[in-house]
Image (cartoon, grey):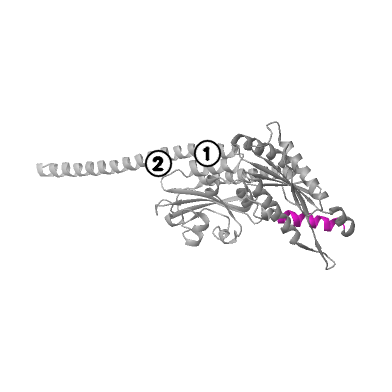
Amino acid sequence: MTESTSATDNGEILEQLAALREENGSLRQQLDEWVSRVRENETISKRLQQSELKVLAAQTLEQIASVVVDEIGNDNGVITTLVVDDPELELARILESEPDPVVSGCIIPIHEFAHLKTLFTGPPAPCFDALDPVLLRSLFPENCLAIKSTLLIPLMQGGELIGSLNFGSTNEHHFEPGMATDIIERLAAIIAVALLNTLNQYRLREAGLTDPLTALNNRRFFEQRLVEEFDRARRTRRPLCCLMIDIDFFKQVNDTHGHQVGDKVLQRVSQTMVEQMRRTDVLARYGGEEFVVLLPETLATTAMDVAERLRARVASEMIALDDGGELSITVSIGLSVLDSSTSEQDTPKTLVAYADQALYKAKHGGRNRVEQEVAS
């Protein structure tokens, strides 16, 4: 073998070694990336497992929303929401009665859900790049202009699509087709179960605290709130007013027109009162044809104006009868006030008793009027 041949062989060996080192370096880099990705996925998996446990333990919408916002969507630039099919506006009423900024920004009831269902064709599967401006406003009402990429995970229950878990990012490459979504899909399944379980708990509580005929709060609910509002008024030294309301000659309505018309009268009067109340007021059916209202942080003069407006509004209503006739209804109202002049010995029941005494005066003074009872 000549020296030139040996040199050539050595050069080839060196080139092969260099190529092997380069390939080995590339493989090492890929391996490091895979190890890093596995560790990252393991971290994400552990974090989502903890979120799953918290969602399973959730008893309120606030608890579910806090997990979705603070833990699932806590990556930089990622916004998370829950859209829920709400054809009967049940969820909307719950959210309205218990306002919470975390919940209102995260859980979005959709009355017309059909246009969202078109995103999940066939067996519902994750949907990417739902970037239509109108759709974005439905999914991310507070941040729609900032969203550049999306991932929507269907929420399923009993084979039916009930909503979606939505991720929006300000990075247009954050969510792209092909990325793994199995862990998130499992979490979405758990969220769907927890969401329906929580709604059922609300329904059970409402069933026990709601009058089935008028859909108003019932006496049990009122008595709970009475204690709370009375104690708060004492603590803050702010006035609290109570109205006792009775439908005039209601027995005659039942005797003359039947109980179905009587029920219709109760429902119409209830709806009229609901329309006149503030969100902070407490309105309940007290029993029979009697209703009761708490007006927190309301002066006696303002409460009298509210009562007079309510009395006049009911008196102006005409209730249509099946035979083509019409029926007019009036109410008598008694007003009592808890303020700085009220005795420290008075209790929540005393406030109602004063209102009841004032109602007695109104009915015996001619009905269709408002009377106030002043504490002695």
Depth check: 168 or 24 in front?
168
Residue under label 2, please give it. Answer: 37
Q: Mark 1 points at which residue?
A: 51
Amino acid type at circle 1 is: Ser
Q: Which of marks 1 and 2 is in front?
A: 1
Q: Quadrant of residue 262?
A: bottom right
| Badge 2 element | helix
Q: Is the magenta stretch mostly helix, strand or loop?
A: helix
Q: What is the C-alpha distance between the residues marked 1 and 2?
A: 20 Å
Q: Which of marks 1 and 2 is nearer the N terminus?
A: 2
Tell me the residue at 49%/41% (across/down).
70
Q: Which residue lies furthest to the left in this view?
A: 3
Taking depth in this image into account, of 73 and 212 the one nearest to the observer is: 212
Instruction: List x then y, in percent, for residue 167.
Output: 48, 50
Along the viewing direction, whichever of 161 and 171 lies nearer the viewer: 171
Tell me: 311 left or right of 127. right
133 displayed left or right of 364: left
Mark 1 Cα-neighbour bin, 10 Å: few <14, some 14–19, many ≥20? many
Q: What element carries label 1?
A: helix
User: Does residue 330 show up?
Assistant: yes
Q: Is residue 260 magenta?
A: yes
| Image location of residue 174, percent across then percent down | 41, 50
Left or right, residue 267 beside residue 235:
right
Q: Is residue 347 magenta?
A: no
Image quarter in which the C terminus is found: top right
Vertical placement of residue 110 versus 42, above or below? below
Residue that appears at 43% across and 44% down = 75
Pinpoint residue 73: horizontal percent, then vertical percent: 47, 45
Start and end of the magenta stretch?
A: 258-272
| Residue at x 59% of width, y 43% of height | 61
Quarter of the image containing the N terminus? top left
